[in-house]
Amino acid sequence: MTVEAALGICSIVAVFALALTGMSMVIGQLRCTDAAVEAARLVARGERDRAREMVRRIAPGGARLHVTVRGDEITTRVTVRPAGGLLPDGWLAGRAVAVMEPGQGQPDQAVPQAPPDDPRDPAVPR
């Protein structure tokens, strides 16, 4: 075996390893995004504990869920540190936004509803 062949084989192995790492990071990114979308949907329904459980099931191991609620808007962010710890936090992250479903917010944020006999209520036949 010549030196050129040995260097060629090492180069091929290095490129293959980088390609696998890149694919792993893309898959991790997609899993974080899927977990963030599912968590936003569940938090909007008032199921925060279930959202954490689903993030543990969907996202890569060691993922963290961050939930921000502003008014009726929910923002979820799922982050995970890439394998090996060579890259800083935040490189693999998914983000999703949802709107709180009626009746799921704080008591002072509840959606006001007209009484059933109110003529302004569109649900009451006229």
Image (spheres, rainbow, N blue to C red):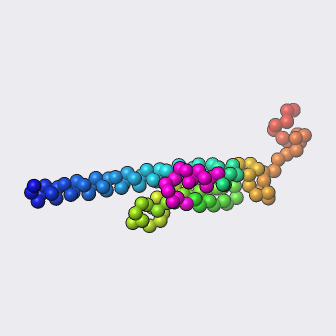
Q: Nearer the viewer, residue 118 or 55?
A: 55
Q: Nearer the viewer, residue 29 or 20?
A: 20
State how many labels appear: 0
46 relative position to 8: left or right: right
Q: Residue at x 64, y 56 (%)?
A: 74
Is residue 113 highlighted in magenta?
A: no
Q: Can see residue 98? A: no
Q: Nearer the viewer, residue 11 or 6?
A: 6
Task: List the single residue furthest toward the left.
Answer: 2
Q: Image quadrant for the N terminus?
A: bottom left
**Residue 61 at x, y = what percent?**
50, 56
**Residue 110 at x, y = what percent?**
78, 53
Q: Nearer the viewer, residue 87 or 119?
A: 87
Residues drawn in magenta: 50-64
44 relative position to 109: left or right: left
120 relative position to 85: left or right: right
**Residue 20 at x, y = what percent?**
34, 52
State which quadrant residue 21 falls in: bottom left
**Residue 86 at x, y = what percent?**
39, 66
Q: Residue at x 19, y 54 (%)?
A: 9
Q: Note whether 41 is above or below 4 in the view shown.
A: above
Q: Can see residue 77? A: yes
Q: Residue at x 61, y 55 (%)?
A: 52
Q: Residue at x 53, y 50 (%)?
A: 58
Is residue 52 highlighted in magenta?
A: yes
104 relative position to 126: left or right: left
Task: List the single residue furthest toward the front.
Answer: 1
